[in-house]
């Protein structure tokens, strides 16, 4: 059957003192896909991943990787998974090449084979020139690469990437994305945690949104976006005194909640492009025209994808969307 | 999606983009070797410890300069008062101070474990399908080399200022071997604290609390006969006293069977108890 689940959790729980860091998470990740786990800092993403990678013992529920329990069959799980953590999981005192040779040997390669493999990986990841430098002297992007290279030393069946691009510049981020795509193209299942909707959008086929240790929404990208609305309108008015009026006009024209931003001349509203005949842009355009008719001067206008903040606000408002 | 945004700007040419084709080639058709034996996994971690010494040679300061300082300090400070002359005293002191220094140096194992945990590399090791104690054994294998270095340095300094080992090469080798066996076993106390305590500072603090009384309340500096009875009871049964006596006698060319047995017994107990606790903490962490 091709529907074998690579990762499956039921009611997974981890408690630290009074804090239920992971509070009953159910996940089902089909083999060969990229599954995005999206959530803010402290949502429980890392804790969940650490349990799946056998680093933490669950306090409740169960988790299986290809049917093997992460507690009872930890060794079988370890032979099939790799983890790239938020912090470089390589030895900073060692050089890039030494790190890879060490891991190669720990994975059972003889020393010459480990050396060959390290050389190939460094080459493939564009790190040949940095091979002899200590990892502590690497840039953020280079660290992330050596870290991922270490994770695919033996191509894993499941790769956990815990916020792989947090803190990277846009170019390094794109390069990490390319690497992830190459890994997935070879059949590895990837579980990716991220704070960026954009990243989940680029890479993942299904996404679970977690907040406070619970899955608050799960589905394909399309389902998730539809549940949040097509886009967000940001407006800046010339005159702060007109904001209250603008809020009313917009709420009527867009049939949506309009939030007042911290900036006294700015407003934000969600546009729900799916529920009416008109597209999001058309709706926004009509709203602008309406504002102009009421004599409200708009200095700046933008229509963008919902940000993660907005996805959260929307999801926590509605509670439990597409299952 | 293409990486059209990834145009190379002059300032970061040093980092080439990863090559897609070569990347793909890396991922296919590799067979997975069988998991390594307990020994080869431990040796790989031992190799890591050597590499760390190679990259950060300053860390050898505590096994070179510190022991030299101890030998010189105690010999000239106490020699005249305790034994009449420094030449007399060094004959008694050197094996003991060697034991004391090496046992003290073992506490750096705990600090190394603790700093490693704070970094991500520990997570990597713990997700590998290897013999669980291998990373710990690897640390201690690296440390054994440090202990050996410290012992040799102290012996060298001792001989320069007048120490003469009556037991010859064989006696010295036997003495140092026993010292290293005990230190390896003793180190498991520190790996335990390294895993148990939260910061490097607290590991250091606890280590001092244990190591100072244990090493000073022994027969390293003086014969326990002049001590009050209750203290003698402690000192005569301390593992450090047994070890110091055994090493001293071995180097002097004797065969202190009882003290050797006591030392090996203590080593076995320490390793069984603290090794087990260390591994339990390691698996639970």
Image: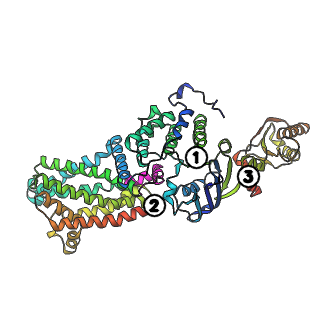
The residue tagged 1 is A188
Badge 2 density bin: few <14, some 14–19, many ≥20, Cα 10 Å: some
Badge 3 density bin: few <14, some 14–19, many ≥20, Cα 10 Å: few
The image shows residue A167 at horizontal and vertical percentages of 57, 41
Residue beneath the point at 40% across and 46% down: A105
Give A244 or A214, whichever is nearer the viewer.
Answer: A214
Find residue A199 and report its image quarter: top right
Residue beneath the point at 48% across and 33% down: A123
Could you give the CA–CA distance between mark 3 and mark 2, rounded to whole angstroms? Answer: 39 Å
- Per the rendering, the mark at residue A313 is 3
The image shows residue A168 at horizontal and vertical percentages of 57, 39
Q: Quadrant of the N terminus of chain B?
A: top right
Give B277 or A17, whichever is nearer the viewer.
Answer: B277
Residue beneath the point at 37% across and 55% down: B38
Give, as a single range, the part of the protein colored magenta.
Answer: B110-131
Please tell me whether mark 1 or mark 2 is closer to you in this view: 1
Chain label for disc 1: A
Chain label for disc 2: B
Residue occupying the far top of the picture: B10
Q: Is residue A260 above or below residue A77?
A: above
The residue tagged 2 is B283
């Amino acid at each position: 059957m091709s529907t074998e689940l690579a990762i499956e959790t039921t009611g997974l729980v981890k408690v630290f003192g009074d804090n239920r860091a992971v509070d009953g998470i159910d996940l089902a990740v089909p083999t060969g896909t990229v599954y995005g786990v999206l959530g803010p800092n402290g949502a429980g993403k890392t804790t969940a991943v650490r349990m799946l990678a056998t680093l933490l013992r669950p306090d409740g529920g169960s988790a299986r990787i290809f049917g093997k329990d992460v507690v009872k069959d930890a060794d079988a799980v370890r032979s099939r998974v790799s983890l790239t953590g938020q912090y470089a999981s390589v030895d900073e005192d060692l050089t890039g090449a030494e790190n890879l040779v060490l891991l190669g040997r720990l994975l059972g390669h003889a020393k010459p084979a480990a050396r060959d493999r390290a050389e190939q990986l460094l080459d493939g990841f564009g790190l040949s020139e940095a091979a002899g430098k200590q990892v502590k002297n690497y840039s953020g992007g280079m660290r992330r690469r050596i870290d991922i290279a270490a994770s695919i030393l033996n191509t894993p069946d499941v790769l956990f990437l815990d916020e792989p691009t947090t803190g990277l510049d846009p170019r390094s981020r794109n390069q990490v994305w390319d690497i992830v795509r190459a890994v997935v193209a070879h059949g590895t299942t990837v579980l990716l945690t991220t704070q960026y909707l954009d990243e989940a959008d680029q890479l993942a086929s299904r996404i679970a949104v977690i907040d406070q240790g619970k899955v608050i929404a799960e589905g394909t990208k399309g389902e998730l976006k539809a549940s949040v609305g097509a886009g967000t309108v940001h407006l800046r008015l010339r005159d702060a005194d007109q904001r209250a009026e603008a809020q009313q006009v917009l709420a009527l024209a867009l049939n949506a909640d309009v939030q007042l931003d911290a900036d006294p001349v700015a407003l934000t509203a969600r546009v729900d492009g799916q529920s009416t005949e008109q597209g999001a842009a058309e709706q926004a355009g009509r709203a602008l025209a309406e504002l102009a008719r009421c004599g409200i001067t708009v200095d700046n206008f933008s229509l963008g994808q919902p940000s993660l903040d907005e996805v959260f606000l929307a999801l926590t408002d509605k509670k439990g969307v597409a299952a | 999606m293409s990486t059209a945004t990834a145009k190379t700007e002059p300032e970061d040419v040093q980092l080439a983009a990863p090559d897609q084709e070569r990347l793909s080639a890396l991922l296919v058709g590799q067979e997975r070797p069988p998991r390594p034996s307990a020994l080869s996994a431990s040796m790989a971690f031992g190799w890591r410890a050597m590499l760390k010494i190679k990259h950060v040679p300053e860390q050898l300061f505590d096994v070179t300069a510190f022991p030299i300082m101890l030998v010189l300090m105690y010999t000239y400070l106490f020699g005249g008062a305790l034994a009449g002359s420094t030449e007399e005293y060094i004959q008694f002191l050197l094996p003991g101070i060697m034991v004391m220094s090496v046992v003290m140096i073992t506490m750096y194992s705990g600090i190394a474990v603790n700093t490693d945990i704070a970094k991500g590399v520990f997570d990597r090791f713990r997700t590998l399908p290897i013999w669980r104690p291998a990373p710990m054994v690897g640390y201690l294998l690296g440390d054994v080399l440090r202990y050996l270095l410290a012992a040799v340095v102290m012996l060298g300094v001792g001989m320069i200022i007048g120490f003469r080992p009556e037991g010859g090469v064989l006696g010295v080798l036997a003495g140092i071997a026993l010292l290293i066996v005990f230190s390896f076993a003793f180190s498991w106390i520190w790996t335990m604290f390294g895993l148990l305590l939260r910061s490097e500072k607290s590991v250091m603090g606890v280590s001092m609390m244990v190591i100072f009384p244990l090493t000073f309340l022994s027969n390293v500096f003086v014969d326990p006969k002049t001590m009050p009875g209750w203290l003698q009871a402690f000192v005569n049964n301390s593992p450090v006293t047994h070890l110091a006596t055994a090493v001293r006698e071995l180097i002097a060319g004797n065969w202190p069977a009882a003290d050797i047995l006591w030392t090996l017994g203590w080593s076995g107990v320490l390793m069984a108890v603290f090794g087990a606790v260390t591994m339990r903490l390691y698996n639970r962490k």
